[in-house]
Amino acid sequence: MLKNLLRLLTLVCLVSFLTPAAQAAESMGIAPETCLECHDDVVSASDFSNSVHAANACTSCHVEITDLDKHSDGELIPGPVKCVRCHKKETAEHYSSVHMLNDITCAACHDDIHTLTPWKGDKRKVVDKCVQCHDAEEVYRNSSHGKALAEGNQDSAACNDCHNLHEINALGDPDSHANREFHTKVCMTCHSNEEMMARNGVFNVAVKTYMESYHGKNYSLGFPDKTAGCADCHTAHSVLPESDPQSSVNPANLVTTCAQCHPGSTPAFVQYYPHGEYTDRENYPLLYWTFIAMTGLLVGTFGVFWIHSLLWMFRGFVENREKLKAHHEGRLHPVVTEGHKQYRRFQRRHVLLHMTVIISFLGLSLTGLPLKFASQQWAHMLMDFWGGTYNAGLIHRACAVLTFFYFAGALLLSLDFLVLRKDIKGNFLQRLFGPDSLCPNFRDIRDITAMVRWFFFRGPKPTFERWTYWEKFDFLAVFWGMFAIGGSGLMLWFPEFFGALLPGWAFNIATIIHSDEALLATGFIFTVHFFNTHGRPEKFPMDFVIFNGQIAKEEFIEERGDQWKRYEKEGMPEEVIATKVSGVAYDFFFKGFGFLALFTGLGCLALMIFAFLTGSH
């Protein structure tokens, strides 16, 4: 009697909680309370009424049971529940997951189907479920993420934040693109949220500083398999603060951590700042002042020379119009006898050296700019054109070798001129500061002053000796560039070697110098040098002299009148007189090469300007 009373009360309770389910079931002819008459030892009415499935009737899942008598007689036996009938999205995600591939069904995780309560976004329930099968989760529980979550901090990363709930993809080959991308991508989901990081007291520029590093730029360009990701340094599950002796980024463990990618790492090498913020004066003063110095160099150089070019552009345009007006009014300039006769300004060795400079510089620019502006879409396209960052790196280094080659060539030519040649008069100092030398002298100050006066219509346009002050600047810039770009580039090329000699933070400084000096070099060449050589009104659209080495007498006298006067006084050197005009095929090839190089440089300049305008630099 008591047993029947308890059963009746249970049925009343179930009906009160499952009215919608009961109504649905009645349309099928089988009510839940009917099922519980036999299955109350399997399903608790009170537990089920509090579960997420409380609104469902028994036959909502066990759809095979359409006839109670046949089921009672054992003819209708329910098969595996088809969760997809209600959970289409979750099932679709699970269908392509690593769990499905290993025959892990819904019930493997959701075995408490009759008592399953809403998780309400509590990640602790996810972790509790995952640790039932995954031993790595115990390592996770002892990590910064695991401990914070256990304390109730729902901001902290749980299994599902990285691996998803149902769409859990196989990581596959540890060296595969998908695996390497996963190592970083999932971390950025939370760590790029500066608001979340701030309220949890976590270093909130980790993503920014990583993406500005060589590692991050490789990742951003789509080649995470060629660089270190977040988990390579911080591990995947055992993420611990730097102060923890067990942390992979604890100072005592850094050599081992870095040695995974950089064999031969030393205690000095690991002094590198992986998240060094060059705008943080308080924590990274060396990086800050290096950045300030390089920024000052950039602003100062471009400020002076861009103003110089703009003034020259306007004054040259006015002069050309004045010449046109003089021709129109019959006030012609004196005709130069044999004005089109060719003289040799450059020897073949100079032409060859300049060709090497062009090839090297454009190669470095086309492979370096995508890395500098890695977030730009054009950078991704250009890097894909090279076949990836690895191939681009090989090309970049090959062009760097060419740079060292032409620098050595420039040194040898200088040595030959200053010391070895017997046909040049004067001692070492006379040669060094003489009119044929590229070394600055007092005359350059007078030329600059006269040029500025001409800009402002305060005097005639100066005539020059063999080398102008802007040509000397270009030449000397090679020496500074080799020290700044070449030196920092070698450090970044061979980090293990230099890491045994220098503290790791020197690589942070080298990165800033290499990047900003390269920006200065490309910006200067593609604007100032191109204008001084090809774009000024007197030469537009191109000065071809560097490709065939020849200059017409009229142009010679007009531009370098003082050099011509000196030659007339001292006697024209034999090497200056052109024995023949350069051939058609030669000129056609090199002029085509020259225009190709010119437009390639201008194209790079346009991409750089676009990147700055869109805020990526």
Image (cartoon, rainbow, N blue to C red):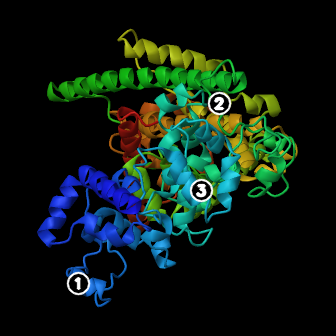
Q: On the image, numbered disc 2 is attached to which residue?
A: 435
User: Looking at the image, which is closer to me, 446 or 388?
Assistant: 388
Q: Residues within 10 Å of mark 3 (few under 14, many from 20)?
A: many
In-image side of 74 versus 248 (left or right): left
* Horizontal and vertical percent position of residue 397: 64, 57
User: Looking at the image, which is closer to me, 283 or 312?
Assistant: 283
Q: On the image, numbered disc 1 is attached to which residue?
A: 69
- Which residue type carries mark 3? His
* Horizontal and vertical percent position of residue 91: 34, 68
Q: Residue sitting at 23 percent across and 80 percent down? A: 68
Element assignment for label 2? loop
- Which residue type carries mark 1? Asp
Q: In terms of image quadrants, where is residue 472?
A: top right
- CB under 8 Å between discs 1 and 3: no
Q: Nearer the viewer, mark 2 or mark 3?
A: 3
Q: Residue sitting at 30 percent across and 70 percent down? A: 35
Q: Residue sitting at 69 percent across and 36 percent down? A: 508
- Identify the mark at residue 396; answer none if there is no mark: 3
Dot placed on the residue nearer the N-terminal end, 1 or 3: 1
* Horizontal and vertical percent position of residue 439: 68, 30
Compared to 561, does 255 lie above or below?
Answer: below
Distance Cα–Cα, label 2 vs label 3? 37 Å
Q: Residue sitting at 26 percent across and 69 percent down? A: 34
Q: Is residue 77 visible?
A: yes
